[in-house]
Image (cartoon, rainbow, N blue to C red):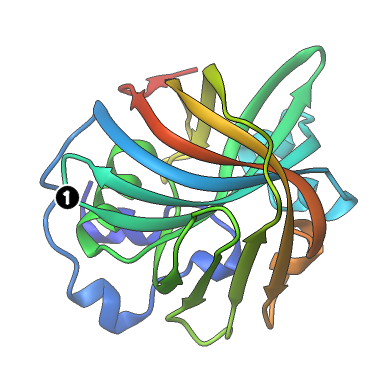
Amino acid sequence: MILTDLLRVPGVPETALSDSVAAALPENLAPAPWSVRSSGTVWFTKAPDAATDALPEALRAQGARAAFVIGGFVRYEETPVGAYDETFGVVGYRIGRKVSATVAFMAVDSPTSVVGGRANWAMPKALAEFEGSPRPGDTFTVAGENDLGWRISATSGRTTPKIPVFSRARVVQEFPDGTLRGCRLKARGWARMTRTQVEVESASTLPDWLVPGRHQGATLEDIRFSLGVPEIL
């Protein structure tokens, strides 16, 4: 994917890349698939009406309606492009009876990961600065580098004993050429249930659908997952 296509990956306003960031992006050093190891914290909410507006245009054109939202912070210890931190907002949606998910918002502190996410899967990764950690009881904070002044923080509360978790999901993204492509995510690891206090600020629409408040969530440990090569749907 050439630079102009990287900049055209659909996403919410907070994922726009500044001219200075775009000019300094490296080549894509790690094509799909990826296998990674990570830890993190996630939270879950019902989808407000604004979450449907956060879906890519190609999905809304097919009648997709938002059903749920997952937000999170991830610390990647092992990836094909090295260690980095990430925050995300995933919108789960329905088309008829079928349920899938799309990454509407994502930010990392690694330019190489920005390129890999956009080039491989059309995930709208932005560049941001992180503080803190995903450990239970700690606060993880991220601030965007563009002019919208967006900021997210998450603090997990008391946790339950850890339990094994397994997940298989399909992630669907709209590519710059307008096609919808899906890839398989397979994950396993450990989770502790918790309540997470989330703060979201932005001059744009991010808090309208990635809503602040105290939400049901989980802290994640030793999560190993793979993300496959996307296929046109």
Q: Residue at x 74, y 31 (%)?
A: 93
Q: Residue at x 16, y 47 (%)?
A: 81
Q: Residue at x 77, y 25 (%)?
A: 94
Query: To which quarter of the image does residue 193 belong?
Result: top right
- The x, y position of residue 97, in whole percent, is 81, 12
Please tell me which residue lies in front, 70 or 120.
70
Q: Residues within 10 Å of mark 1 (few under 14, many from 20)?
A: few
Please tell me which residue lies in front, 102 or 132.
132
Q: How many marks?
A: 1
Left or right of 113: which side holds 171? right
Label 1 sits on what residue type? Gly
Residue pointed to by mark 1: 82
Q: Is residue 233 above or below residue 35?
A: above
Please tell me which residue lies in front, 14 or 1.
14
Q: Is residue 77 above or below residue 22?
A: above
SS assignment at label 1: loop
Left or right of 202: which side holds 46? right
Please tell me which residue lies in front, 188 or 62.
188
- The x, y position of residue 200, in whole percent, is 70, 71
In the rendered image, the residue lying farthest to the right is 49
Left or right of 188: which side holds 208? right
- The x, y position of residue 10, in whole percent, is 51, 52
- The x, y position of residue 137, in whole percent, is 60, 60
Q: Residue at x 43, y 40 (%)?
A: 175
